[in-house]
């Protein structure tokens, strides 16, 4: 491949309108507070609904989830102690209500970051009013808990004020490209513009930088490893004519679920099943979301650095358009051991960002590591909800059980291969990246106070 020539490309994508989500499974509806065991779980679900309905891409959405989760965590820690705060320490007065602090921290954080959508604001305001009514207006403690929650929200807002997040939601950004040629990423059907390149430059919540654990480069196109990877995804990931069985196809579709919903639901379920306290639940949700955000920042940082091509582009060089990145049609890989196939398409639609490393492998592995370390065992024994092709768009109707963390990691690698959107080596590199991100984060934040 020719040496890289650096240039910048800028596209702007229109943020997804809430109306586009109306009637779907992801739209929040003001129907009273979620029927969940405590205020932490309730406001985690409220945050999830607001973030997903805003149209935020999944990595982008995890940034917003982390803002709320860390504010809630700091509010609870200020009153109950036991763990290091994420942001500046808050001095809570005696008698402060922890529930009032949770409600205030979550509400004030969310209304700060989602001020312009009248529908979302109306839902938030109704949830806030309902919560205050349930808690007798949070006046019994003289507003002490409310003040703690407000301080926690303001601290996080100030701490993250210049973190590199771009608005409006769904915005793309300039990124350095490479000369067109074999192995270089191109837009893929249906040819949406590059998804949130800027996320790879946002200041992480737990890591020192998003490139802290950058992976090795992808395999060379001249290698036997490349030929094996090409042939495997070509055979197993194709939309039609694949030897996949029904279960493998269902698993591929299972992992098209929104990861914000998927793993926040898993965390809430775990908190309920293990009878976690309010403090432990707040910590779990803060860890899940910040580790996920950092994992997705890390993988986007690597993706837009390596700019490696997706299977559909490598297998079918005609599957490109006049996208500003190179000629039409695309390139053959130059390796005589691979056989291209015009018209080849994957089972699952290819996400609109570069190939390597795999984002789902990274994020799922990071979550698996969180569960392992917090539970103190690789035998995590958890149920994860995912997408069922028999249900409505955006559903989490399918449920799969994982006895161990490695079982979860192995399945996501296969799922993305069977879906036709990742080479095996991409997801495997993501698994290693996610493990490192989570392990570092858990050893540098949310730690118990001796």
Image: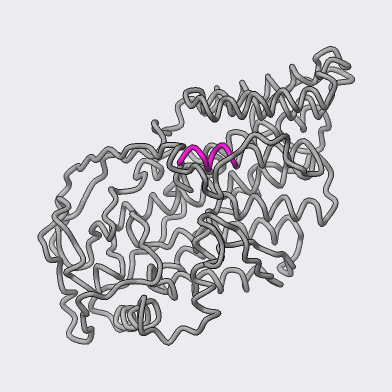
Determine whether, in the image, residue 298 is placed left or right of residue 155.
Answer: left
Residue drawn 41% across and 60% down?
Answer: 215
Residue 29 percent location from the top left of the image: 61, 38
The answer to which quarter of the image holds residue 125 is: top right
The answer to whether residue 74 is seen in the rendering is: yes
Foreground residue, 446 or 172?
A: 172
The answer to whether residue 208 is seen in the rendering is: no
**Majority secondary structure of magenta residues:** helix
Residue drawn 25% across and 56% down?
Answer: 187
Determine whether, in the image, residue 88 is placed left or right of residue 185.
Answer: right
Compared to residue 147, the image places residue 234 above or below, namely below
Residue 105 percent location from the top left of the image: 68, 26
Q: Is residue 51 magenta?
A: yes
Foreground residue, 158 or 248?
A: 248
Give the colouring mode of the picture.
one colour
Residue 225 percent location from the top left of the image: 34, 80
Query: Which range of residues does the magenta coloring cover?
Result: 49-55
Compared to residue 164, the image places residue 418 above or below, namely below
The answer to which quarter of the image holds residue 214 is: bottom left
The answer to which quarter of the image holds residue 278 is: top right
């Amino acid at each position: 491949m020719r040496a890289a020539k650096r240039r910048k490309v800028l596209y702007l994508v229109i943020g997804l309108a809430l109306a586009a989500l109306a009637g779907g499974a992801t739209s929040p509806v003001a129907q009273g507070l979620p029927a969940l065991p405590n205020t932490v779980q309730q406001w985690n679900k409220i945050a999830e609904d607001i973030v997903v309905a805003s149209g935020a891409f999944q990595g982008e959405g995890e940034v917003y989830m982390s803002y709320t989760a860390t504010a809630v965590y700091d509010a609870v820690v200020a009153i109950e102690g036991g763990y290091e705060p994420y942001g500046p320490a808050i001095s809570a007065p005696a008698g402060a209500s922890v529930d009032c602090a949770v409600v205030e921290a979550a509400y004030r954080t969310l209304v700060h970051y989602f001020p312009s959508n009248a529908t979302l604001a109306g839902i938030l305001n109704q949830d806030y009013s309902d919560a205050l009514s349930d808690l007798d207006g949070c006046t019994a403690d003289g507003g002490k808990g409310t003040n703690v929650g407000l301080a926690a929200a303001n601290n996080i807002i100030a701490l993250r004020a210049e973190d590199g997040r771009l608005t409006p939601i769904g915005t793309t950004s300039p990124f350095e490209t490479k000369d067109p040629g074999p192995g270089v990423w191109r837009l893929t059907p249906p040819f949406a513009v590059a998804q949130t390149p800027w996320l790879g430059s946002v200041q992480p919540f737990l890591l020192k930088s998003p490139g802290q654990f950058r992976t090795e480069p992808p395999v060379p196109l001249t290698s036997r490893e490349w030929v094996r990877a090409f042939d495997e995804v070509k055979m197993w990931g194709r939309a039609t004519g694949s030897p996949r069985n029904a279960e493998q196809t269902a698993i591929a579709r299972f992992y098209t679920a929104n990861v914000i919903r998927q793993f926040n639901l898993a965390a809430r379920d775990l908190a309920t099943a293990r009878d976690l306290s309010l403090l432990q639940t707040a910590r779990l949700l803060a860890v899940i979301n910040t580790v996920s955000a950092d994992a997705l920042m890390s993988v986007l940082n690597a993706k837009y650095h390596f700019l490696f091509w997706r299977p559909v582009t490598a297998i079918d060089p005609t599957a490109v358009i006049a996208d500003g990145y190179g000629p039409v049609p695309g390139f053959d890989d130059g390796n005589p051991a691979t056989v291209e196939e015009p018209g080849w398409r994957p089972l699952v639609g290819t996400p609109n960002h570069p190939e390597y490393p795999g984002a789902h492998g990274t994020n799922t592995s990071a979550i698996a590591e969180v569960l392992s370390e917090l539970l103190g065992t690789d035998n995590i024994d958890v149920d994860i909800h995912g997408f069922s092709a028999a249900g409505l768009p955006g559903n989490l109707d399918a449920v799969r059980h994982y006895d161990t963390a490695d079982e979860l990691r192995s399945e996501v690698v296969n799922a993305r291969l069977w879906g036709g959107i990742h080479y095996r080596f991409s997801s495997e590199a993501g698994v290693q990246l996610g493990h490192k991100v989570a392990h570092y984060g858990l050893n540098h934040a949310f730690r118990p106070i001796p």
